[in-house]
Image (cartoon, helix red, strand yellow):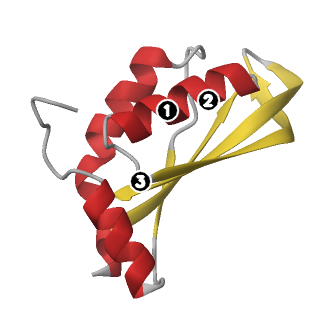
Amino acid sequence: MDSDFLVILMTAPGLESARQIARALVEKRLAACVNLLPGVTSIYRWEGQVQEDAEVLLICKTRRARLAALQEEVKAIHPYQVPEILALPVAAGSEAYLNWVGESVQTSNPAQS
């Protein structure tokens, strides 16, 4: 049962865009919950140069079946040209919590979000 669940890591340039992404994912039932962790410093290579920026880390809980739709939504609304979307499988977790995630995330694309 646990392999049906994913934790998605992504970053956003600020709290406003992170909130917009998180709300969209939860409202559209693509994620059960999104935690926002401001104050993250990211050091990365982009366009041949090492960059350093303050970002907000988003931690999303979802089902594997909704990953493609979640990625599409993020790409449509994210301000970055190449948004970070890393899906990590859940190896184990509280049965009650995973049941809640499963109930909160729709496994099909509903006509009404």
Q: Which mark is residue 19?
A: 2
Question: If you read the primary sequence from the N terminus, does the residue marked by circle 3 or circle 1 appear first?
Answer: 1
* Left or right, residue 47 beside residue 66: right
Q: Is residue 94 above or below residue 56?
A: below
| Rendered residue at 45%/73% (across/down) | 90
Give the quarter of the figure containing the C terminus: top left
Disc 2 secondary structure class: helix
How busy is the neighbourhood of tag 1: few (under 14 within 10 Å), some, or many (20 plus)?
some
Residue furthest toward the left?
111
Residue 59 % position (x, y): 60, 51
Which image quadrant is residue 11 in?
A: top right
Specify the amino acid type for callout 2.
Arg
**Mark 2–mark 3 contact, CB under 8 Å?**
no
Quarter residue 75 falls in: top left
Q: CA distance from mark 3 to mark 1?
A: 10 Å
User: If you read the primary sequence from the N terminus, does the residue marked by circle 2 or circle 3 appear first?
Assistant: 2
Real-space Cα separation, disc 2 to disc 3, in angstroms: 14 Å
Say which element carries label 1: helix
- The numbered disc on residue 23 is 1
Q: Which mark is residue 35?
A: none
Percent of width and height locating residue 94: 47, 85
Image side of residue 1 versus residue 96, left or right: left
Kind of residue sitting beneath label 1: Arg
- Mark 2, other Cα within 10 Å: few <14 / some 14–19 / many ≥20: some
Quarter of the image that includes the N terminus: bottom left
Mark 1 touching mark 2, by CB under 8 A? yes
x and y, in percent, of residue 92 in the image: 46, 84
Residue shown at the point (53%, 35%) measured from the top left: 22
Task: Out of 45 and 111, give the one closest to the viewer.
Answer: 111
What's the amino acid at mark 3? Ala
Residue beneath label 3, please?
32
Local secondary structure at mark 3: loop
